Each structure stands twice: as structure tokens, then as C-alpha cells.
Image (spheres, rainbow, N blue to C red):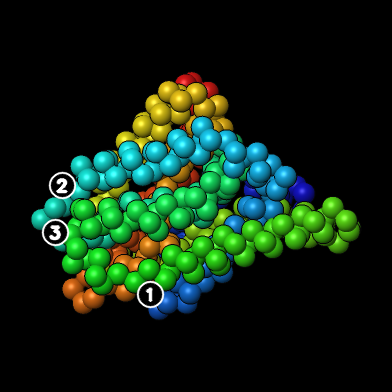
Amino acid sequence: MPGLVAWLEKHQVACYLLALLAGALIGLGFPEISGPAEKAINPVLGLLLYATFLAVPFSRLGPALKDWRFLGTVLGLNFLVVPLVVWMLSRLVAGEEVLLVGMLFVLLAPCIDYVIVFTGLAGGAQGRLLAATPVLMLAQMLLLPFFLWLMAGPEVMGVVEWEPFLSAFIWLILVPLLAAGLTQAGAARTVLGQQISDAVGAAMVPLMMATLAVVVASQIHGVSQELGSLLLMVPIYLLFALIMVLLGLLTGKVVGLDAPGRSALIFSGVTRNSLVVLPLVLALPAGFELAGLVVVTQTLVELVIMVMLVRLLPKLMAGA
């Protein structure tokens, strides 16, 4: 078993690409699986985040939350820089209201879940990013309505239901975080607790593979059905990621963040809250059905980018 765990960790990027491919093939070959797979996303993602939080020493979260330079930079990048970038990119679809609304929802909301996982895989400061998560979540709940009103108009604001934000924060952040804290406390006191902690840690790569495969399998068929309309969004999402990587590198260097901090900053700027905003978009009225697939398309593009960044970002940090 230790040999298998070591092999998976060594070849994790290839494993994640394989999981993406497997999810795509299953979703396209068996369209009826999309419903059950979509229901499985949150449970699998919750387990993945539990394993991620378990690997973060809770004793370090207090000092991480007091790192005002990092926290301020993450907030500034996500809520000052990103909206400007999104507004400029949104001009490319300004005449297509449904595409515009879906794009704004997903690109204006910074990720608060699996970004922590990818940050850790790339050697970034996942503890500092985890400490910033509640602030990021609260800020986007307050600011997303304003940005949507500014860029999409007041008519969109009147039909949005915001409860999924709170639900996602409870089930994808608070519950896994509490469970990880209890497990860490048990590991320090009992042999069984340590065994559970070790087993969960060993399952990290398989859990990530399962999450990637389930997300892709649940959404790929719907995307393929509207491929013509959605192809326009792919270069926009790729351009957004490229811009945010460059701006993240520049911003982190200007404010004097260390390499792990810059990596975490870049992942936070690139990764969006697609799994949380998707229920909001799906609750939009008739006529906006395609907006959900616009969000899903961003998820699929982003997952490939994240897997690539896990391999590429440490090299960028070394050369910066």
C-alpha cells in the first residue's frame, strides 16, 4: 500500500488527466449517468476537502489569518482586478445576454473549495488560503450582486436566489473543516485516530480523481449538445486564466509575497466558484437555460488548466 500511494503521488498529474478523460468518455457514452453523477459532486467534493483540511495543521491557521499582506492581496486581486478583467472580456459577448450572464456569474466569484487542494498540490500556501476562505466567501456574497447589477443590469438581480451560497459554505467548508479538526484531535490522542488520519491522507489522489471524473461525467453530455454556442466561451476562459496567471505573478512579486504565497494567489485568481454558483444560475427563469452550460463549460476548461498549473507553476515560481 505505501508503494501504491507513493506511485500515485509521483504520477498524480497523469492520473488527473486520465480521470478527466474517463469522466468525459463515461458521460458521453452513457448520458443517463449525468443526473446521478451531478448528485454525487457535493459528497465527493466534501470528502476531498475533508482530506485536504486534514493535511493542514490547524495550529497554523491563526497566524495565517493574521497575514494581512497575503489576505489583502488576495482580496484586492479577486475583487478589484478580476472585475476589471471580466468586464473587458465580457465585451466579447455583450450582444448575447445569456452567454454574458453565465460568464459573469462564474468569473466574478473566486473559488472557495478545490482551489485549496490544487494550491497544496503545487506547493502553494494552502494554509493561508484556507484561512482566507471565509473572508472570500463573505466578500463575494456581498459584492457579486453589485457586480452583476453593474455589468448585467437590474433585471437579472431580481430573479436570482442566493441560498445555495450559504448551503455550499456550510456543507463544503464548515462541515469538512469541523470533521478534519476532530480527526486531528483524535490522531493526537489515539492510535485509531492516527490510523484514520493516515488512511484519509493516502486516499487524497484517488479522491481527487473521483471528483474530477464525477464533475466531467455529470456535465459533458449537456455541453456537447450545445457545443456550437459554447465554443465561443472556451477562448474567453483560456484568456482569462492566462491573464490572471500573469497578473498574479506580477502582483505577488510587487507586494513581496514568498513563492508559496504567490502560488496561492495565482490559484485564487484563476480558479472560480463554478460548483457554488451553478445552482444560482440553474434557478434563473426560462430563457436562461444555456447560462448553466456556460458555467459548466468554464468548469471543464478550468479543471484542465488546474491540472496543468500543478505541474507548471512550481517551475514558474523557480524562475520568477
- At label 1, which amino acid type do we have? Pro
Q: Is residue 187 depicted above or below 43 in this figure?
A: above
Q: Label 1: how many residues lie within 10 Å, few (<14), some (14-19) or many (20+)?
A: some
Q: In terms of secondary structure, where does tag 2 sit?
A: helix
Percent coordinates x, y for residue 136 in the rendering = 46, 50
Give the mark nearer the N terminus: 2 vs 1: 1
- CB of mark 2 within 8 Å of CB of mark 1? no
Q: Is residue 53 left or right of residue 229?
A: right
Percent coordinates x, y for residue 87 in the rendering = 22, 45
Q: Which residue is mark 3?
A: 96
Q: Report the disc number at residue 91.
A: 2
Task: Tell me the mark number nearer the camera, choosing from 2 and 1.
Answer: 2
Q: In terms of secondary structure, where does tag 1 sit?
A: helix
- At label 2, which amino acid type do we have? Arg
Residue 138: name its quadrant: bottom left
Q: Label 3: how many residues lie within 10 Å, few (<14), some (14-19) or many (20+)?
A: few
User: Residue 286 versus residue 84: which sits nearer the camera?
Assistant: 84
Q: Which residue is mark 1?
A: 31
Percent coordinates x, y for residue 55 in the rendering = 69, 49
Q: Is residue 19 visible in the rendered structure shown here?
A: no
User: How far apart in space, not on screen, are marks 2 and 3 (Cα)?
Assistant: 10 Å
Q: Is residue 124 visible in the rendered structure shown here?
A: yes
Q: Residue at x 15, y 47 (%)?
A: 91
